Image (tube, grey):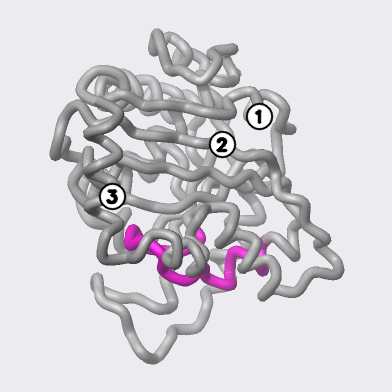
Amino acid sequence: MGFFKRNPFGHLLFLKKWLIRIAGTLTHRRYRGFNELQIEGSEIIRQLPDTNVLFISNHQTYFADVVAMFHVFNASLSGRNDNIKNVGYLWQPKLNIYYVAASETMRSGLLPKILAYAGAITVERTWRADGKDINEKKAVNPNDTDNIMKALEDGWVITFPQGTTKSFKPVRKGTAHIIKTHKPIVVPIVIDGFRRSFDKKGLRIKKKNILQSFIIKEPLQIDYDNETIEQIVEKIEFAIEQHPSFLKVIPNEVLEEQEKLNELRRW
């Protein structure tokens, strides 16, 4: 790899590699030390093609979720089975991994700007501004969808289709449009425990000895030509376990208490 080789967004791959190495080394104990990351399905990662893969996941913190995915993906590609033992897997990281993030989040400080260089595709949220929901939606910036397409053509893209860290919020139709248009392999991921481990931004450890779960599911079966946007949205909601029907099983008011009980049982 040449020293001045760049990705499609103009980022120097040499610099990106070192940012991933350093950030990964500094954060490793957050998932294997202070807390423990329980992984399922790492063999699925090794079966995926090098490009046009879209990961969809529920969202619990701004940054800790994405950082965990960089660890799990690279560990899996290095042959580790459902674990992130020995951070040496980051010496030659996969450099064509991108993640979709809100522009306002990535502009919120020096550290987010550095993390953005590691692979952020920043988008303007049409339903939210300055940390608040807005009634009158803004127009979608066509450059945002173009950049996601460019990233899919180059590699893997991580997205959080609810667009928020709050549980059981609706899946945004934009993700379904991307799936229907670009026909990527769609891999669902379900995470848990991150909200209790970290602060909202995912930069500060809030509580130790939390068992974090990270479940990688088989790629979705999607009829790209015949399924409607609404059908794809519903399929996403079920896949990341955020469909409203899940609330009938566990009422919203006891979700947090149930999570605490689960942690006590595990330990």
Residue drawn at x 69%, y 60% is 179
User: Can residue 22 be seen in the rendering of this structure?
Assistant: no
Q: Mark 1 points at which residue?
A: 44
Which of the two marks, 1 or 3, is nearer to us in this view? 3
Residue 214 image offset from top left, x and y in percent: 45, 35
Badge 2: how crowded within 10 Å, few (<14), some, or many (20+)? many
Quadrant of the image occupied by residue 28? top left
Image quadrant occupied by the N terminus: top right
Residues at circles 2 and 1 in contact by the CB criterion of under 8 Å: yes
Labelled disc at residue 130: none
Labelled disc at residue 258: 3
Q: Residue flagged by tag 1: what amino acid is it?
A: Ile
Residue drawn at x 75%, y 74% is 228
Q: What stretch is highlighted in magenta?
A: 161-178
Which of the two marks, 3 or 2, is nearer to us in this view? 3
Residue 125 image offset from top left, x and y in percent: 42, 71
Numbered marks: total = 3
Q: Residue flagged by tag 3: what amino acid is it?
A: Gln
The image shows residue 50, relative to residue 257, as above or below, that is above
User: Can residue 140 be seen in the rendering of this structure?
Assistant: yes
- Decide if residue 181 is on the left or right side of residue 200: right
Q: Magenta part mainly helix, strand or loop?
A: loop
Residue drawn at x 59%, y 20% is 77
Labelled disc at residue 216: 2
